[in-house]
Amino acid sequence: KAGVTQTPRYLIKTRGQQVTLSCSPISGHRSVSWYQQTPGQGLQFLFEYFSETQRNKGNFPGRFSGRQFSNSRSEMNVSTLELGDSALYLCASSSQGGDTGELFFGEGSRLTVL
Amino acid sequence: DQQVKQNSPSLSVQEGRISILNCDYTNSMFDYFLWYKKYPAEGPTFLISISSIKDKNEDGRFTVFLNKSAKHLSLHIVPSQPGDSAVYFCAASDNFGNEKLTFGTGTRLTIIP
């Protein structure tokens, strides 16, 4: 079955703008998580959605927000972009019933803020 | 404060030899640990996991060891193959199935043919 799909794959924005990233989870997966990857920081948890509700949130400012739709697709939004927001944004989905607890990641959306 | 630490940014190993990747954690609440592998331009893929009730888990060439008292885990790859060249991330959560994972900064493994 199709994996996690993220769009767009690459984008360039300028400071002060806002951006919306999209994620389609694996069919049947109801949990979607978002992570930010920057050099030297590893992957940092942004938030997790399950059945359209934010279930968990990381330590990011309120400029970072997300939502999940009834079909489990998710979007995340970053407003008032800063240079430090340049990163790879990864979406992951999970089945909530698997025997390894693993997350299935998409290829990511690489955001460059100029 | 980095709660999961991978102190070796890079590691080079001869093909056929054992690769040992290390990870330390500081949060005593962590009780489930995972290893992910990441190739360039791809998302991380799950390799192997271990619960805190175990001290070893094996899957083919991959074995993860957990030392709870030392708050240390390691991933052994035997024998190492060129296709194992990737960045390896250690991750931890406070319970099985929790999507909020705390990741280390990764170790770039290069297998030398």
Image: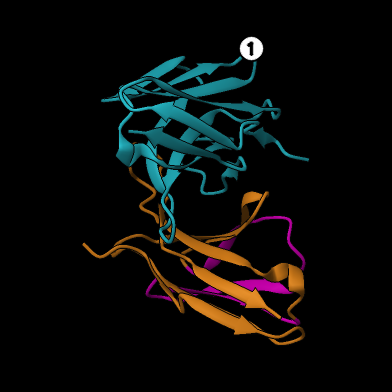
Chain colours: A orange, B cyan
Which residues fall within the magenta stretch? A52-80
Choose top left, top right, bottom left or bottom right for residue B17. Answer: top left
List x then y, in percent, for residue B91: 54, 38
B88 relative to B7 in the view: left or right: left
Q: Is residue A78 magenta?
A: yes
List x then y, in percent, for residue A114: 71, 81
List x then y, in percent, for residue B32: 51, 31
The residue at the point 56 percent across, 36 percent down is B10
Quick one: A17 or A11, which is closer to the camera?
A11
Choose top left, top right, bottom left or bottom right for residue A86. Answer: bottom right
The residue at the point 36 percent across, 64 percent down is A4
Give the crowd class for mark 1: few <14, some 14-19, many >=20 residues within 10 Å. Answer: few
B97 relative to A62 in the view: left or right: left
Quick one: B1 or B62, which is closer to the camera?
B62
The residue under label 1 is which amino acid type? Ser
The residue at the point 71 percent across, 28 percent down is B26
Vertical relation: B103 (above or below) A2: above
List x then y, in percent, for residue B42: 40, 58
**Residue under circle 1?**
B69
